[in-house]
Amino acid sequence: MRAVRLTVATATFGLASLGVGSFAAVPAAATIAIQPDIAMSRLVSTGAPPTTAQCVAEFQVPCYSPNQIEQAYNLAPLYAKGYDGAGKTIVIVDSFGSTTVRRDLAVFDKAFHLPAPPSFKIIQPAGPVTTADPGWAGETDLDVEYSHAIAPGANILLVETPTSENEGRTGFPQIEEAENYVINHHLGDVISQSFSATEETFPTRQALTSLRGAYINAAKNNITVNTASGDSGAADVGFLGNYYYTYPVTSWPDSDPLVTGVGGTQLHLNAKGNHTAPDNVWNDTYNVPTQEFIFGDAGPNPLAGGGGKSIYFSRPSYQNSVASVVGSQRGVPDISMSGACNGAAIMYQSFPGGGAPGFYEVCGTSEATPLFSGIVAIADQYAGHDLGVINPALYKLSQDGAPGIVDVTKGNNTVTFTQDTTHTVVGFKALPGYDLASGVGTVNAALFVPELAGAG
């Protein structure tokens, strides 16, 4: 997933008087560097995790705890019946990993009263990792913490690769090798990938399709693969993240027919995690407080979930029911979960080079993907077997009006930015039913899990 990360020294101010430690502010002269494949994050507390009200008071941007997010997706009825991912393993794949991920997860779990995962293993099947990268470390912490928060009974297998995914082919051969190792050794049930590359960064269709081996292998072995749809709206970024495309594009692997593409929504929650308004498509491009919080300026800068039509894959049969939307091409995303920065998730990190140890607000489809992977792990447990490629089930459930699919009917992923001149890339609007901004919608987990388990 392509995102931006602040490269600034932080100053502290604010909410210590409220008992939540020091909060970090972005200096006015913040330097923004577009980089691929990392989650967006901001330090908000070096003490206790903040509340939603404290984040709003300090930054005009709400933040949500894992407990609120669990409530938002109605997971409590499943937990009460013992459905929490037990017996299943979520595979998290990230370049480089995080040297402090075990400690960070332990602090996160203690802060939010979560149990430790039954098993948490780290492997490097594509070669030893010799590089530490703060961006990927933050991504790793986010992926591990929030897949675990949703499916606390599932095992976690973190798969670290020795090269960075930087758009195009870069990094993908090692990712494919590592994932095939996991699949061939039957080490996991759901693969969560919070990265993707703009399709146009591959020079040819063959350059892309030659890297599909792991997804074909996963499908044959009934393993679900979930992938983030990106954080730059309809624009997305080029090789090494040095520029935005000035016309609508989409990304792979989320565009792969064997992969479930996960888009972003914006949650509106109260302190208990109950909805105060329906979810809408995540798009913070034009929200000034959020732009100042993330980028240090009023924007607009692209900050929205990816989505659109593939240039390499034709419409799969499971999308025939939405042919009026996707035409002859594969459309993404398939489904969406929380990804907004204006309503970000709270995570803990302490790795070197990542700023002061503490609680950070994080956002993007990097958040949405591990959330959905946790729900799929619970559905696997509910079904009593792995569900494999779930896309046919998602579209059938949507077509049948299954109550576990919650339609998202507001918002779009149009973005505006300055690149020599000002560009607006007109994206896609949320519509009743399937659309290229939110997919089939989002989920009510207590209803969706048994529906998915039955349809799968």
Image (tube, rainbow, N blue to C red):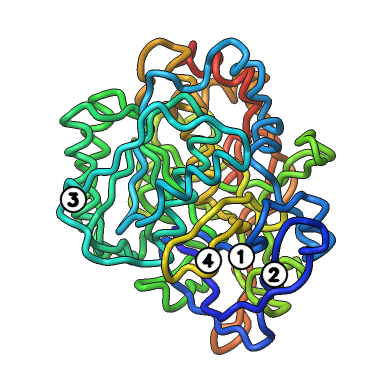
Q: Name the N-terminal-most of marks 4 and 1.
A: 1
Q: Circles 2 and 3: CB distance less than 8 Å?
A: no
Where 356 sits versus 370, above or below? below
Can residue 324 be seen? no
Residue with the mark numbered 3: 210
**Of discs 4 and 1, which sits in the foreground?**
1
- Residue ID for mark 1: 42
The three-letter code of the residue at mark 1 reads Arg
Q: Earlier in the sequence, mark 2 or mark 4?
A: 4
On the image, the x and y values in percent for residue 193 come to 39, 46
Q: Earlier in the sequence, mark 2 or mark 3?
A: 3
- Are circles 1 and 2 on residues that touch, CB within 8 Å? yes
Helix, strand, or loop for circle 4?
loop
Q: Position of residue 396 (x, y in %)?
A: 52, 21
Which residue type does callout 3 highlight?
Ser
Name which of mark 3 and mark 4 comes first in the sequence: 3
Residue at (24%, 50%) from the top-left corner?
175
